[in-house]
Amino acid sequence: FQAVFYVTLLQMFTLYICAIVMVRLFTNTSSPDDPSHEVLASKFSTVPRTMLTLFELMANPELDEYEVLMYNHPFLMFFYPGFVMMGSFGLIAVLTGVISESMFEKNQVRRQEEALERDIQHQNLRKVFGDLFDSLDLEGVGGLAREELQGTLPQIEKAFEQEG
């Protein structure tokens, strides 16, 4: 979650900075007789509107409607393609991070469940074999002779088969 948060925060910061630059350099300085004034006024009038326009441009890089801007402001001819490439990589990084993080979480949960199942299985086997040993150690000495243990092989095999 943390990586996705930071990449998203970086994307938002980049959008904000680029929006400020666009509004200050182009929209605020354009005059009504500028051929690109209509596009600037409709798409880049305020910082929030410019952020939305830039996000739309990142998500769907259609530069056709911005041709007038690029011809009248040569800086934008380099800015838009660079912004689209870097922004698209950022969006892909966010999506990849979300998917990867989800996969890691699920894998970790699955591993924890498997470890819990193994612990339960070990406890069950420990109890079964402890009970078996106690039933064979009639003298209470805490040990069995090999011959006594040889006779319990079918019971041991059955215990392992039952526990998987």
Image: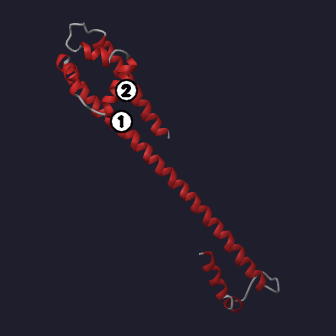
Residue 49 % position (x, y): 37, 20
Residue 135 % position (x, y): 78, 83
What secondary structure is found at the residue carrying circle 1? Answer: helix
Camera-nearest residue between 155 and 149: 155
Contact? badges 2 and 1 (CB < 8 Å): yes
- Are there few (<14), some (14-19), or many (20+) residues within 10 Å of tag 2? some
> In the image, is residue 108 above or below residue 40?
below
Question: What residue sits 36% from the left and 36% below the top?
Answer: 90
Left or right: where 17 falls relative to 38: right
Q: Hey, what amino acid is under mark 2?
A: Thr
Q: CA distance from mark 2 to mark 1?
A: 10 Å
Residue 85 % position (x, y): 28, 34
Task: Give the quadrant of residue 97.
Answer: top left
For label 1, the residue is 90
Task: Give the quadrant of residue 153.
Answer: bottom right
For label 2, the residue is 14
- Are there few (<14), some (14-19), or many (20+) residues within 10 Å of tag 1? some
Q: Earlier in the sequence, mark 2 or mark 1?
A: 2
